[in-house]
Image (tube, helix red, strand yellow):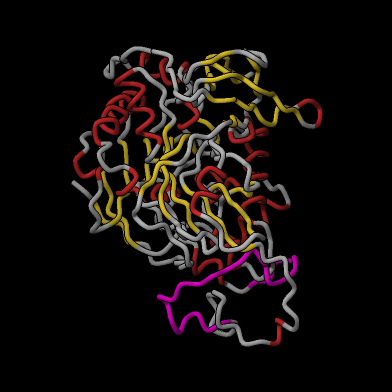
Amino acid sequence: MSKDIRIKKGLNIRLKGAATTEISGAPRSRTFNVRPADFHLITPKMVIKEGAKIKAGDDIFYNKANEAMRFVSPVSGTLQEIRRGAKRVITDIIIEADKEDSYRDFGKTDLSDAAAVKARLLEAGCWPFIKQRPYDVIANPEVTPKAIFISAYNTAPMSADYDLILADKGEQIQAAIDGLKTLTDGPIHVGVPKGGNSVFNNINGIETHNVSGPHPAGNVGTLIGRVDPVNKGETVWTIHAEDLVIIGELLANGHYKADRIIALAGSSVKTPKYYKTKIGAEVSTFVYDSGLNEENVRVISGDVLSGKQISPEGHLSFYANVVSVIPEGDDYEFFGWNKPIFNKISTSRALTFSWLNPKKEYELNTNTNGEHRAFVVTGSYEEVFPLDIYPLQLLKSCMVKDLDAMEAMGMYEVAPEDFAVTEFICVSKQPHQKIIREALDLMYKEIG
């Protein structure tokens, strides 16, 4: 039986350039990139060398802290280059792809055997899809979570529509759910849009929650906070809804198929739409296929609030299901401070006129419209932050590295993306997500 969750606090940021429902096949990428930085706090140990021939699903590296946790190739081809940065840290692993993929055969998995499911996910490179709270890192396979949370409701600006990208994937999703429910003693909670036609309505073994409200209503952190918050000593797992398809394909058919349907969106894109591609593909294969309205743009692997900037010749990150392209915004607006602000968004009626037309779509660039300064106490964060947490006090305790205060204020249940909206409206231009990420890393090192 489904339950209703209504979120009142938040902010819908309506931007021009949302992807249409058209789905096209992206041209085959010449190279693919497996980027260790996508897997936070993982130290990679290579198992193959440059020039090696590999199949999709073959090992590339493993986690130094847990050799059983493998990271695999999304395609078949040749390991072209291992790029290193300072102190010889591996930054990129470039694979020159074959024209057609050949797959390593892992065989079918007994979905009722928890040990077999866990071993298969670890060896076939699907374990990184499972993240945990606290700390928002790849889940510790030695810890049994009290519950698993999945959000199938995207509320971020220009985000992908799960009903579209998961259409006809019910068989793989059911296989993934059947396998994952053996790994927890608790329920699997899934958040779906209220009134929407979700593929999860026909999936067995889950508890669905009909979610409504402004962003970040669709964040999995919001779902956790409303259903079963994380207390000290507890662990929950989170999985992106689209990753269930890859997990289910592996468990049911024995192949690691890193297929992605991504939304190419943004006001700088001529024809924003969906593309079929693979994890780690060159974004230029579909960005230039759709065309750009201008040259000076910022390409973001992910949504505009929490994604990562990449070059137009960069590669799709491991967890992204959207690529956003917006104007760079590095041009100077002469006397911009002295002009009426009709084309900007704010929660304050004193600063802009966006409240007069709540359904208007805006064409925003990357300009911060202000300089970094100390926190100004305005009370605006609490208006857009739906968790039962004091956001400003938590951010300040993170900045001074007060572990006791962070623990007392609910740090165990948050992730950087939960603070994306507060960062967007921050008049002090403080990097909220970076502050939270660094504080979580500190807690993981000292407590975890």
- Residue 304 seen: no
Q: Residue at x 27, y 54 (%)?
A: 210
Q: Is residue 217 above or below residue 367?
A: above
Viewed as shown, does residue 312 lie left or right of 228? right
Residue 245: x and y in percent read 35, 33
Examine the image and state in which quarter residue 83 appears.
top right
The residues colored magenta run 352-377
- Total labels: the figure holds 0
Q: Does 367 lie within the magenta span?
A: yes
Up-down: is 400 above or below 247? below
Looking at the image, residue 342 lies above or below residue 77: below
Q: Quadrant of residue 293?
A: bottom right
Residue for point 43% across, 81% down = 357
Q: Quadrant of the C terminus?
A: top right
**442 within the magenta span:** no
The chief SS type of the magenta part is loop
